[in-house]
Amino acid sequence: MEAYKKGKWAQQILSMRQPDSLWGNFHTLSRPVAGKGYTTEQAIRRLYYLGYTAEDEAIQIVLDRMERCIKGELAIDAYSEKKHDWPFFEKLMLAAWLRLFQPNNETALMVARQWAQVVEKAFAGGSYSRVEDAAAFMAWKGRKPKSSFETGFGMFYHAALLPGVLPPETETLFLDYYLARPGGMFYLYDKPLCEPPAVFASRAASGYLAAIEVLSRYDQAGGKLDFVIRWLQANRDEKGQWDFGEKAKDGIYFPLSDRWTASTRIADSTFRVNQVLTALR
């Protein structure tokens, strides 16, 4: 992992920082476009997969800025989308990233616990209820939900925000819900997570694993995701390694090594799979 942190991909991203040590506007989780600059969110996601943590100065600067934005001390940027309650969405988004890098960050946990109360009420009947979800949201915010992120809990951000703040029974139902959603986990994978991709050597399989990585942070994930372990084990080669294939090179999760030869691609793939297996065992 240390080699990835010091490699050319990390150095390339760090060299693109602006004077405030960010990368411009924060939000977008779309795939980076060759020849264009990163958003701050794209940059920290890529650095996360290259092994950067909250202990690294480049990340700590961003985390501090995000935390101050949640607290209302300053803006993360000047961007907004009129169709959403953008300040509210920003808190969800920024708190989710804070918890990925700093699971015990109290500012992010405050946001997580607020959302957790809505989740508990939405699943109180033993399965997800959109009616109860909307009612809980109304009680919290004093208005009806008006954007897709305000009901349904289908995004990467909801899933990244809530590990460790739900009662075990609710967490189990929440994981079942994510696994069964027809649209998968919005931003990462758009098919049911209960059905691993048929072709392992593919970009789809890499995106699928990204969603599983998020769910693996939940206490109840081990038992729920046994089928993922079996899928991974079934796709090992004769040397006990994995290969997501050349098409998985997307500038997000891969490549990790400076040059993606067949051997380094297998090394990168195997490293990533082993991290997930460790989290699930």
Image: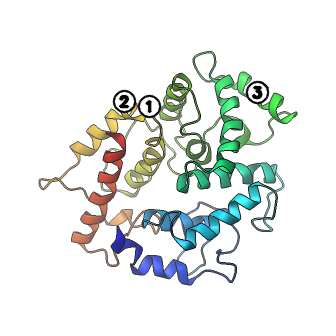
Mark 2 and mark 3 in contact (Cβ < 8 Å)? no
Does dot 1 land on a helix, a strand or a loop? loop
- Which residue in the protein does label 3 denote? 136
- Residue furthest to the right in view is 142
Q: Residue at x 78, y 65 (%)?
A: 79
Task: Tell me if 188 is positioned left or right of 91 in this view.
Answer: left
- Distance Cα–Cα, label 3 vs label 2: 29 Å
- Residue furthest to the left in view is 238
**Tag 1 or tag 3, which sits nearer the N-term?**
3
Q: Which mark is residue 223?
A: 2
Does dot 3 land on a helix, a strand or a loop? helix
Q: Residue at x 61, y 80 (%)?
A: 17
Q: Given this view, does label 3 or label 1 mark the residue nearer the observer? A: 1
Q: Amino acid at mark 3?
A: Ala
Q: Residues within 10 Å of mark 3 (few under 14, many from 20)?
A: many
- Which residue in the protein does label 1 denote? 220
Q: Is residue 47 above or below residue 214?
A: below
Give the image location of residue 18, x and y in percent: 66, 81
